[in-house]
Image (cartoon, helix red, strand yellow):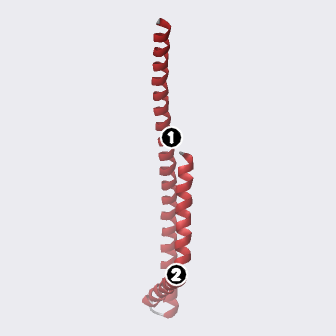
């Protein structure tokens, strides 16, 4: 009889230990996933800020340069704006479906990659 009680106590202790270890494992997986996502977000944010600054200054320089060539500064800004309007028009009417499909594929790959880690 005492052996049965001792066996049950051992089983309960092991079950409690298993629960604690499982909880710690879940915490570590969440921490790993969170740190991975935050570091990825921060590194992408830094690159986006740098590229945005580069694009801004490149466009300002091009607008001023074109304006100087044409004699009036605002002509350069109008030409740069018209260039982006043409690009937006082309993207909207000719590349919208392609771009949407590529973004959808990327998002699906991103989520499927994350669910594989769990």
Q: Quadrant of residue 108?
A: bottom right
**Residue 63 drawn above or below residue 4:** below
Q: Residues within 10 Å of mark 2 (few under 14, many from 20)?
A: some
Q: Which residue is mark 1?
A: 29
Residue sitting farthest toward the bottom: 71
Q: Quadrant of residue 73?
A: bottom left
Q: Nearer the viewer, residue 85 or 60?
A: 85
Q: Nearer the viewer, residue 69 or 81?
A: 81
Residue sitting farthest toward the front: 1
Q: Nearer the viewer, residue 20 or 79?
A: 20
Where residue 20 sits: x, y (%)? 46, 28
Q: Which residue is mark 2?
A: 91
Where residue 19 sits: x, y (%)? 46, 29
Among numbered discs 1 and 2, the one appearing first in the sequence: 1
Q: Residue placed at 48% from the left, 37% from the top?
A: 26
Q: Residue placed at 49% from the left, 32% from the top?
A: 22
Please tell me whether mark 1 or mark 2 is closer to you in this view: 1
Q: What kind of element bears circle 2?
A: helix
Give the distance between the C-alpha atoms of the residues marked 1 and 2, in whole angstroms. 41 Å
Q: Residue placed at 52% from the left, 62% from the top?
A: 107
**Residue 13 drawn above or below residue 101:** above
Give the number of the disc on residue 82: none
**Residue 98 drawn above or below residue 77:** above
Where residue 51 sits: x, y (%)? 52, 67
Where residue 8 sits: x, y (%)? 47, 16
**Residue 79 drawn above or below residue 12:** below
């Amino acid at each position: 009889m005492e052996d049965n009680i001792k066996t049950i106590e051992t089983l309960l202790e092991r079950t409690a230990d298993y629960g604690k270890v499982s909880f710690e494992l879940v915490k570590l997986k969440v921490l790993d996933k969170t740190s991975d996502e935050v570091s990825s977000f921060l590194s992408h944010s830094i690159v986006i800020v740098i590229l945005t600054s580069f694009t801004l200054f490149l466009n300002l320089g091009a607008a001023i340069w074109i304006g100087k060539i044409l004699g009036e500064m605002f002509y350069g800004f109008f030409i740069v704006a018209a260039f982006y309007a043409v690009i937006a028009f082309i993207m909207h009417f000719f590349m919208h479906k392609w771009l949407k499909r590529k973004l959808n594929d990327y998002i699906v790959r991103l989520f499927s990659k994350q669910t594989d880690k769990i």
